[in-house]
Image (tube, rainbow, N blue to C red):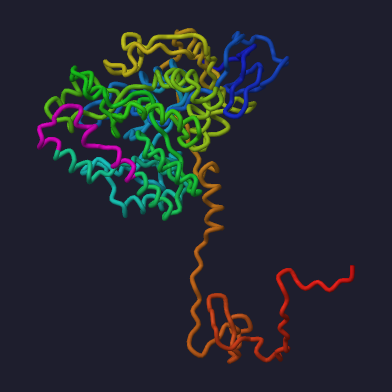
Amino acid sequence: MGSMRILIKGGKVVNDDFTQEADVYIENGIIQQVGKELMIPGGAKVIDASGKLVLPGGIDTSVHLQESFMNAAIQDDFYSGTKAALMGGTTMVLALVLPDRALADAKACCDYALHVHNEMETLVREHGVNSFQMYMAYKDMMMLKDSELYQVLQTCKDIGAIARVHAENGELVAESQKEALDLGISGPEGIEISRPEELESEATHRAVTIANRARCPIYLVNVSSASAGDMIAAAKMQGKVVHAETTVAHAVLNGSQYYHQDWAHAAAHVIAPPLRIDPDTPAYLMGLLGNDTLSVVASEHRPFGTKQRALGKDDFTKIPHGVAGVQDRMSVIWERGVVTGKMDENRFVAVTSSNAAKIYNLYPRKGRIIPGADADVVVWDPDATRTISVSTQVQGGDFNLYEGMRCHGVPLVTISRGRLVCENGVFMCAEGSGKFYPQRTFPDFLYKKMVQREKVCLNIGVVFLSKGFTGNSLVSGKDTNAPLRYVFLFDLGSQVDDHIPKRSSARILAPPGGRSSGIW
């Protein structure tokens, strides 16, 4: 479907920093006007948004489509995955580790971008890729040593890319997995036992430290625990350039699912880092999203089926890691974040759209409703409800983590680059109508602060004076034997003012407060 003229009338426009009652006029794929009593040409399709919210389209920063992982093929390609995204109010996905962009171009319905890890400089300069993901876990698969991570972070800094880091102590995870298997633990609970919270928080601290030494902004993904969240909060308080995302699963569910008596149910929740056993963790993470410790919530969409997960029926380390969520992300976060009072509507827009746009250098063309922005818009009904079910989902997989959850907040209309793609549950977008969205490097949201910090925190070496050489020569260019105190020197011997005659002084004995001799 081609671009069209659309007038969204009578709604509340919600950006990350303010809400206003305004109409929105769209033409040629761009938001042309925002305000009241707009002057528009005839022939526009009018969408009545009275009593509804008008939001920037969602941006999902962690989506896996049309790839294989841990010997299993993901059950969504670029058509089904992006269709599910649009049905849920997400108009752009950032897909990870796609070997061939041509596969995506032929199938995608909404805009997308890619994360890859090879030939970084070429990908940045010639192919519009501006983010790279590094793993501190998955030993013998993708794990980087500290020195390798440091080198990659330095490269990211030099080329202005976003450095995404999955933080878990991969060495200790591998040892813990062996220990669990030796103890006869083979079920899905093994992922929670072998990847405890402390291995995430340790790696988070280490990743932030390495990034700080490399003078590179860092973006931590899949934050799953309270202690890792606290590490990030502390780093931000220290002025380090750290941003982080959690996933909707980690912010809503807990690790008790791994102990479910139904193996298939338990295995369907396997993700790394795992859901945490502490029942208070999801609410804590949702609170960190609300207070800006965590910047973004993603789906980490990587759906598998029961048959694929059965690869690990007798060995939990072989269960492919991944859950579905690209379709339900927006509604679930609204229900558990906004409805519960953890965040307001503006913060909801920030964590589901605007912050991602800022971090990935898409803002304000994406993530904001203003004239000149791409017309990625969602008409959102905050009062409508829907019950999530695998039987009605568009996304891949045969299990839904949020089965039976009744959610307030429903996308009634989704507009992608000026095209009406979803309306009242009806999908009307042709396969292949999405496009790759090249991304620029050096996003101000990350690098502006880092550049300023480099200026302020520039390391300057100490200048040591050789024997028979004094500091005066540093200024005049001539050596002199006159004694001198110079910047880094401290001397209790002769001083430069020793030639000045000393004045005699008198000691006066007086009571505290001075002596009174006045006449009253």
Q: Farthest right residue?
A: 520
In reply to whether residue 445 is colored magenta, the answer given is no
Whole-percent x, y for residue 95 in the image: 38, 31
Number of marks present in the image shown: 0
Task: Please state if 142 lies on the left or on the right of 228 as rendered.
Answer: left
Q: Decide: is 206 above or below 79.
A: below
Between 509 and 477, the one nearer to me in the picture: 509
> Mainly helix, strand or loop, the magenta region?
helix
**Hey, which quadrant is residue 185 in on the image?**
top left
Task: Please state if 5 lies on the left or on the right of 355 as rendered.
Answer: right
Q: Decide: is 442 above or below 506.
A: above
Q: Which residues lie in the magenta part?
A: 180-203
Q: Is residue 127 visible?
A: no
Between 416 and 56, the one nearer to me in the picture: 56
Whole-percent x, y for residue 443 in the image: 52, 42
Between 13 and 250, the one nearer to me in the picture: 250
Q: Quadrant of the C terminus?
A: bottom right
Residue under the image location 49 percent in, 25 percent down: 342
**Hey, which quadrant is residue 322 in on the image?**
top left
Residue under the image location 34 percent in, 50 percent down: 149
Whole-percent x, y for residue 447 in the image: 52, 47
Q: Decide: is 459 above or below 214.
A: below
Q: Is residue 467 visible?
A: yes
Between 494 and 429, the one nearer to me in the picture: 494
Whole-percent x, y for residue 62 in the image: 38, 31
Task: Please state if 278 lies on the left or on the right of 128 as rendered.
Answer: left
